[in-house]
Image: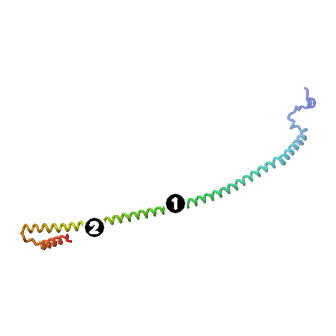
Amino acid sequence: MATTDHSEAGGEHAGGMPQLEFDTWASQIFWAAIALFLLYQILAKRIMPRIATALEDRHHAIADDLDSAAELKLKAEGAQATYQQALADAKARANEIADKTKAEIAEQVDAANAKAEAEIAARTAEGEQRIAEIRAAAATSAKQVAQETAQAIVEKLAPGSADAGTISAAVERALAARGMAQ
């Protein structure tokens, strides 16, 4: 059996993983410490300040956005209050206009009613006057017809005895008894 020496095989390790060989640990620990130190320096000096700056910028941007949002909210609330006030004023003005229009219409209706009532009253008075004239004329005509009829009857029954004054007085009494005399 032939054993191979590590130096004869051209520096190849035949026993396993080189990280697990105790004779190379010191150099591995040294280079790991240097790599970690360099990595720490790079992180501490270059990367972490950039991350911190980015986080701070982000924090300021968020704070500015929140301040802007608060300002816009106040402006929106002010605009809404102005809108509500304008709406209330418009409603009040509309109610005033409606009330004024209703009052004007009521006045016009009242004036038209008064005019119509005056016309009706005038026509009623005119009609009542005509009726009174017609009744007076009818009463006069009825009295005259009654007198003529009575005189004709008396002439037929007792010729020559018809006295116009007596017949007229009798017709007057008969009409007065019936409530038709004037």
Give how far across and how far down residue 73 sits, in percent: 65, 56
Residue at left offset 19%, top offset 68%: 140
Q: Which residue is mark 2?
A: 129
Identify residue type, mark 2.
Gln
Give how far across and how far down residue 119 sits, in percent: 35, 64
The image's mark for residue 171 is none
Identify residue type, mark 1.
Ala
Q: Decide: few, some or many residues near mark 1? Use Cα within 10 Å; few <14, some 14-19, many ≥20.
A: few
Residue 5's quadrant in the figure?
top right
Q: Quadrant of the image for the N terminus?
A: top right
Q: Nearer the viewer, mark 2 or mark 1?
A: 2
Give how far across and how far down residue 166 sits, in percent: 12, 73
Position above or below: 59 against 25: below
In this rendered view, identify the residue nearer to me: 93 or 41: 93
In this rendered view, identify the residue nearer to me: 57 or 128: 128
In this rendered view, identify the residue nearer to me: 80 or 13: 80
Outermost residue to the right = 7
> Is residue 37 rendered to the left or right of residue 71?
right
Q: Secondary structure at mark 1?
A: helix
Residue at left offset 88%, top offset 40%: 28
The image's mark for residue 94 is 1
Residue at left offset 22%, top offset 67%: 137
> Is residue 69 rendered to the left or right of residue 36?
left
